[in-house]
């Protein structure tokens, strides 16, 4: 499953995405996830392009649930509240820290992203 991961409600979105990407790449349970960044066109006065989303390719084997648990942990450790938007080819789901506080909820969210119903 391919996902686009975006962050809403952050003043430092690019830095937050970079931090989350670093966490995903370092986590042994998430190594099977292929990652890339989507770069926005620089705005006037900007010094260069800025990461505005993460592109994630998730295979089978439980990496999706581990990813959502990692995102939930990252969200819980933040001082400010943010929402993470995950978009698949089928639909978009917005999550907050309460949306994925249990593995069952994470699995349910993953299924909804991968199902056309």
Image (spheres, grey):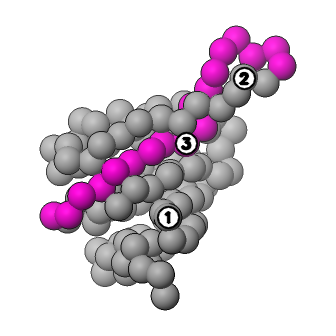
Which residue in the structure is indicated by mark 1? 89
Q: What residue appears at the point 32 percent right and 76 percent down from the top-left corner?
A: 107
Q: Secondary structure at mark 3?
A: strand
Q: Secondary structure at mark 2?
A: loop
Residue 75's disc number: none
Q: Is residue 45 magenta?
A: yes
Query: Mark 1–mark 2 contact, CB under 8 Å?
Result: no
Depicted 6 relative to depicted 113: above or below: above
Q: Secondary structure at mark 1?
A: loop
Circle 3 residues within 10 Å: few <14, some 14–19, many ≥20? many
Which residues are drawn in magenta?
44-61
Q: What residue appears at the point 29 percent right and 62 percent down from the top-left corner?
A: 64
Depicted 83 relative to depicted 36: above or below: below
> Could you say where residue 72 lies in the image, as x and y percent from the top left?
41, 59
Mark 1 or mark 3, whichever is nearer to me: 1
Which residue in the structure is indicated by mark 3? 53
Which residue in the structure is indicated by mark 2? 42
Q: Nearer the viewer, residue 46 or 39?
A: 39
Determine the CA span between mark 3 and mark 2. Answer: 14 Å
Q: Is residue 116 magenta?
A: no
> Could you say where residue 23 lies in the image, as x and y percent from the top left?
33, 39
> Could you say where residue 95 lies in the image, as x and y percent from the top left?
53, 66
> Could you say where residue 53 lies in the image, as x and y percent from the top left?
55, 42
| Image quarter of residue 60 | bottom left
Determine the CA span between mark 1 and mark 2. Answer: 26 Å
Q: What residue appears at the point 60 percent right and 54 percent down from the top-left corner?
A: 82
Q: What residue appears at the point 30 percent right and 43 percent down from the top-left corner?
A: 34
The mark that comes first in sequence, 1 or 2, is 2
Q: Would residue 93 be seen by someone viewing this image from the given angle? A: no
């Amino acid at each position: 499953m391919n996902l686009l991961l975006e962050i809403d409600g952050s003043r430092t979105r690019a830095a937050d995405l970079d931090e989350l990407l670093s966490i995903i790449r370092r986590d042994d349970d998430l190594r099977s996830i292929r990652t890339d960044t989507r770069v926005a066109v620089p705005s006037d006065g900007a010094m260069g392009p800025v990461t505005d989303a993460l592109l994630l390719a998730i295979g089978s084997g439980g990496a999706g649930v581990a990813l959502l648990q990692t995102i939930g942990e990252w969200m819980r450790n933040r001082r400010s509240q943010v929402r993470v938007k995950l978009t698949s080819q089928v639909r978009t789901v917005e999550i907050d820290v309460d949306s994925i506080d249990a593995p069952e909820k994470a699995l349910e969210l993953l299924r909804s992203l991968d199902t056309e119903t």
